[in-house]
Amino acid sequence: MTNGIPLTKDFANGGVSFWYRQIGLPGRRPALPGPRSYDVAIVGGGYTGLWTAYYLKKADPGLRIAILEREFAGFGASGRNGGWLSAEFAGSRERHAAARGRQAMIDLQHAMFRAVDEVIAVTREEAIDADLHKGGLVHVATNPAQRRRLREEVADLRAWGYGEDDMRLMDRDEQRDRIQVAGTLEAAYSPHCARVQPAKLAVGLAEAVARLGVDIFENTTVTAIRPRRDGAQAAAVTTRGAVTADYVIRATEGFTASLAGQHRQWLPMNSSMIVTEPLPADVWKHIGWQGRELLGDQAHAYIYAQRTADDRIAIGGRGVPYRFGSRTDVRGATQRRTAALLWRMLVRLFPAAADARIQHSWCGVLGVPRDWCSTVHLDHATGLGWAGGYVGSGVTTTNLAGRTLRDLVLRRDTELTALPWVGRQVRQWEPEPLRWTGVQLIYALFRAADRRENDHGTTTSPYARLANLISGR
């Protein structure tokens, strides 16, 4: 036991993620051999880049497409996330509606519903075994303030395209039958979510993209992206030569700050996870969770969890939310105190799992725009495009982004290109040390709000309201 956490003898911290520990790190593809020219160059080999390449190549097999990846395809958040293939969309609905109207935001939500099934359909078509199971999503409230927020949220969703079958409050019997979470006062259920093993999806999708004829160059660091100008093509500048293309798509999410001129574009927010050893049948008898729904709570410093295909509990949340200067982790290693925090949350929610040992901890970064709203964009004049800022909801949103970028590159006027997140412009984050100070303050306030609500709050804490005001959410 370390820091009060029971650990397995083979406990590991980092090594990218437990998901890769299960399947082994993929072999590296060759690096860029030198300067090259393509029709489309994609910077970043995560879900966004892979989905974009997949749909472009399917739509026009003659397109010459390259993906440029610093590590290996799926190294970042795509291979480290909580495995929520969810229809939840990041950002303020009101903010998106202000751009193109309320119906446009409702259309966006319905597109997210369909995107969940689209991902499932592609995995079947491409024979990608990613432990997918569409069991839905359960949100629990464990104090009166959370219960009030959950009820208000479900009621508000009715105005944003959610019908009774899309999200509903559960009665006590159904909640207990689905999953036993200690202290639950209220719970809601949505069918629009599936569990996925993230690394299996990333590796399988990369293999499918390569089979289509897309060139994936790994161990290739892009340092800058240049727009089309003075008759020259757009370009991705790498340490191994420049790749010129009609279009260069930035798909770097939490690693965007590493590119020249992009340091304040998206904040690399850290999220951490732990996973238990496989739990025995007698523990599952107390917990239930036979439907293998995804699980979240209504805390401000919220958690996300899944029951894995091999009967572990994987649970994640924010630990140290941001590193000064937009620095990122070293191959997924997280702080031991963060793992301890997640273990205490696991035991609080699932007392029956109190003796379970932790086998792995890791972390990754996700991209956060200044207004916390995802965006997808393509500028035909400069030849530059991008998608990201998913704020932790990227497993599904990346698929929608890939199909939208396909239509934008091919100059198709479709339902996807009319959605309100297309072309959204967001101001940059503040320079350091304001950025670091602000994020630390925001999450200190969220943690204080959770403590206050757990102690005696029946309404959302003023600390949380202040944190939301500062953050611009």
Image (cartoon, rainbow, N blue to C red):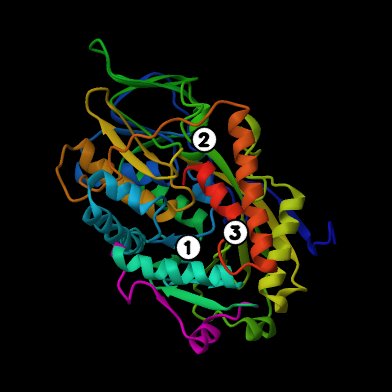
Read off the residue under disc 2. 255
Above or below, 93 relative to 76: below
Q: Residues under labels 1 and 2: Cα distance?
A: 23 Å
Judged from the image, the secondary structure of the residue bearing numbered disc 3 is loop
Disc 2 vs disc 3: which is toward the camera?
A: 3
Question: Where on the picture, by quarter, is residue 310?
Answer: bottom right
Work out which residue is located at the far left of the displayed protein and give it: 413
Disc 1 vs disc 3: which is toward the camera?
A: 3
- Which numbered disc covers residue 196? 1
Specify the quadrant that holds the N terminus: bottom right
Q: Residues under labels 2 and 3: Cα distance?
A: 33 Å
Work out which residue is located at the far bottom of the displayed protein and give it: 173
Report x, y in % for residue 13: 71, 50
Q: Amino acid at mark 3?
A: Ser
Q: Is residue 57 visible?
A: no
Question: Where on the picture, by quarter, is residue 373?
Answer: top left
Of callouts 1 and 2, which one flags the residue occurring earlier in the amino acid sequence? 1
Disc 1 vs disc 2: which is toward the camera?
A: 2
The reply to whether discs 2 and 3 touch (Cβ–Cβ < 8 Å) is no
Closer to the camera in the image, 279 or 366? 366
Q: Residue 425 colored magenta?
A: no
Answer with left or right where residue 67 lies relative to residue 160. right
Of callouts 1 and 3, which one flags the residue occurring earlier in the amino acid sequence? 1
Read off the residue under disc 3. 461
Work out which residue is located at the far top of the displayed protein and give it: 230
Closer to the camera in the image, 90 or 66? 90
Judged from the image, the secondary structure of the residue bearing numbered disc 1 is loop
**Which residues lie in the magenta part?**
160-182
Above or below, 371 relative to 6: above
